[in-house]
Image (spheres, rainbow, N blue to C red):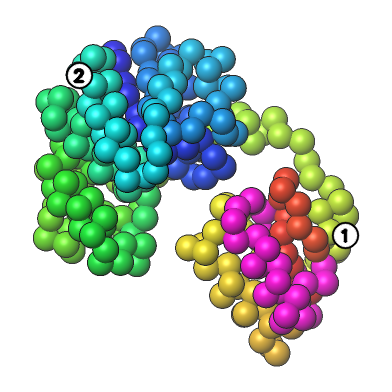
């Protein structure tokens, strides 16, 4: 069986992680996995190539370059995969159009919920196209609710939680609390794990830690990497709750205690 995934990049993100897990597992099972993307360099490129996943790097000048769609349409017609699965809005639009044009079954991956889709032209186009997908697969009930509430429900809606690579987690080395800037005895603690981006609402966590009832009573540990890291650190310093941890690409970002 041949499968084509379409995703903008292979950066450190939840969608990218799921694509890596799925394509690796698909290849190990003896099938043929293809991945179309704009930029190959990323956290998962080497491991995917080693696993036998075929990467197709598209030429483009901007995210609005019509060549993205044209190349995907050509790729879908040439490969004739059993399914085209698209990830994130850019590829939901370009890859979805390509799958429809090639007459290939299309699965749209929903990674967000209604608050993540303001009424922009791009989001309207994605919703209009999504009605024509053979299935929408969401990793949350809120994601499914978005499609139900819009009145543009596609042919099939499925809830499939994120895959968890337990073997990798078990094999990962332990992190020393002191090296991560966390007290040896953190007392009451709160930890988050994921991308450090605005949509994760970590700013609200920092604001909560600054409340009189919690100040000095709770240690918060935010593990991950992402574009909002500096803003989260700055807010923690401004609220006076940044004393118990530093920030590193490997893990712990901000805390209060």
Residue closest to the eye, 164 or 101: 101
Spatial CA distance of label 1 from label 2 is 58 Å
User: For residue 37: magenta?
Assistant: no
- Residue, disc 1: 184
Residue closest to the eye, 27 or 125: 125
Q: Quadrant of residue 56?
A: top left
- Report the residue at 56% width, 30% height from top: 41
Secondary structure of the residue carrying numbered label 1: loop
Quadrant of the rendering where the N terminus is positioned: top left
Mark 1 or mark 2, which has the lower sequence index? 2
- Report the residue at 43% width, 33% height from top: 38
Residue 8 position, x and y percent, is: 42, 38
Quadrant of the rendering where the C terminus is positioned: bottom right
Q: Quadrant of residue 133?
A: top left
Residue 160 visible from this viewpoint: no
Residue 168 visible from this viewpoint: yes
User: How many other residues sit within 10 Å of disc 2, few (<14), some (14-19) or many (≥20)?
Assistant: some
Residue positioned most to the top: 30
Q: On the picture, is 82 further left or further right than 39?
A: left
Residue closest to the eye, 120 or 82: 120
Asked if 31 appears above or below 68 in the picture, the reply is above
Secondary structure of the residue carrying numbered label 2: helix
Residue 24 position, x and y percent, is: 47, 22
- Residue, disc 2: 77
Asked if 175 appears above or below 196 in the picture, the reply is above
- Magenta stretch, residue numbers: 216-244
Q: On the picture, is 54 further left or further right than 149?
A: right
């Amino acid at each position: 069986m041949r499968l084509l995934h379409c995703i903008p990049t292979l950066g450190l993100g939840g969608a990218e992680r799921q694509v890596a897990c799925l394509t690796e597992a698909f290849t190990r099972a003896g099938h043929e996995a293809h991945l179309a993307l704009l930029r190959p360099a990323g956290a998962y490129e080497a491991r995917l190539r080693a696993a036998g996943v075929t990467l197709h790097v598209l030429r483009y000048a901007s995210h609005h370059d019509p060549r993205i769609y044209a190349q995907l349409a050509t790729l879908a017609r040439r490969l004739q995969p059993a399914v085209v699965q698209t990830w994130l809005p850019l590829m939901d639009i370009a890859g979805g159009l390509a799958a429809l044009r090639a007459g290939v079954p299309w699965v749209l991956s929903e990674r967000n919920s209604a608050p993540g889709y303001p009424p922009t032209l791009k989001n309207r186009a994605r919703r209009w196209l999504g009605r024509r997908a053979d299935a929408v697969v969401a990793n949350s009930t809120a994601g499914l609710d978005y499609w139900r509430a819009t009145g543009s429900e596609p042919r099939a809606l499925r809830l499939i939680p994120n895959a968890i690579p337990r073997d990798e987690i078990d094999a990962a080395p332990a992190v020393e609390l002191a090296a991560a800037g966390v007290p040896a005895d953190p007392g009451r603690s709160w930890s988050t794990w994921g991308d450090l981006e605005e949509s994760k609402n970590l700013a609200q966590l920092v604001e909560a830690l600054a409340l009189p009832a919690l100040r000095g009573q709770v240690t918060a540990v935010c593990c991950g990497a992402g574009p909002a890291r500096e803003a989260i650190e700055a807010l923690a310093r401004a609220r006076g709750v940044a004393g118990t941890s530093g920030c590193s690409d490997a893990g712990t970002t901000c805390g209060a205690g």
